[in-house]
Amino acid sequence: MTSKTGLEFKVGDAVVYPAHGVGKVAAIETQEVAGMALEVYVVTFEHEKMTLRVPTKKAKTAGLRTLAADDTVSKALTTLKGRARVKRTMWSRRAQEYEAKINSGDLISIAEVVRDLHRADTQPEQSYSERQLYESALDRMAREVAAANKIDKDAAMALLGKSLSAKKVVTPAAEEAEAA
């Protein structure tokens, strides 16, 4: 994937930056930093109205990557259909783990967060922080699925909703019966 000049991405490529999600390479510039010439990718994120400059030589270690491949997207959608795996630890610790998974930029990890925090209509209401993490993960996942499948975000949300509705719902009573 690396070209002769050592660049992985071209202007116009859709890329994923772990902490911000899907962006587009707007330009490749050479900037002078501390008296040294530094080549950078200029990545724009429309949804956050933000521009990020990533040194081309550090792009891989910074986590900048191409969009998820079709097989990764289908694995992520299959993950959504799975059963929620909620650990019996304090919420603050689980929240940190969820946040780390979201910021990892890995589509499968983000799908796990969406799966674990998704609530069906028959389940109890989420706390504010749970809802915030869920919406953040769902939004990040929807944007990448939309970009990877070349569909709009609403169509991606419908696709994710379809996978989540196929999920096995576990009520606390059913969980206790299964444990016994």
Image (cartoon, rainbow, N blue to C red):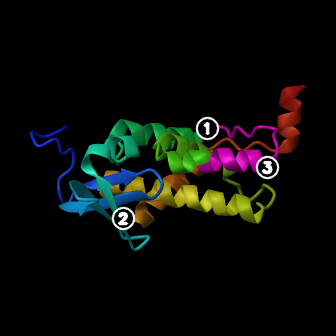
Residue 116 visible somewhere in the drawing: no
**Residue at the farthest front position:** 35
Q: Amino acid at mark 2?
A: Asp
Q: Amino acid at mark 3?
A: Trp
Q: CA distance from mark 3 to mark 1?
A: 21 Å
Q: Nearer the viewer, mark 3 or mark 2?
A: 3
Dot 2 falls on a residue whose secondary structure is: loop
Q: Which mark is residue 116?
A: none
Dot 1 falls on a residue whose secondary structure is: loop
Q: Is residue 142 magenta?
A: no
Q: Is residue 94 magenta?
A: yes
* Occupied quadrant, residue 156: bottom left
Q: Residue 153: x and y, percent?
A: 41, 64
Q: Residue 13: x and y, percent?
A: 23, 55
Q: Amino acid at mark 1?
A: Gly
Q: CA distance from mark 3 to mark 2?
A: 34 Å
The residue identified by callout 3 is 91
Question: In the drawing, does residue 2 fall left or right of residue 154?
Answer: left
The residue identified by callout 1 is 82
Q: Residue at x 37, y 52 (%)?
A: 16
Residue 125 visible somewhere in the drawing: yes
Q: Earlier in the sequence, mark 1 or mark 2?
A: 1
Magenta segment range? 82-99
Q: Earlier in the sequence, mark 3 or mark 1?
A: 1
Query: Residue 150, relative to residue 71: is it above or below?
Result: below
Q: Residue at x 81, y 40 (%)?
A: 89
Q: Residue at x 35, y 48 (%)?
A: 64
Q: Earlier in the sequence, mark 3 or mark 2?
A: 3
Pointer 3: residues within 10 angstroms few (<14), some, or many (20+)?
Answer: few
The residue identified by callout 2 is 152
Question: In the drawing, does residue 27 fall left or right of residue 23?
Answer: left
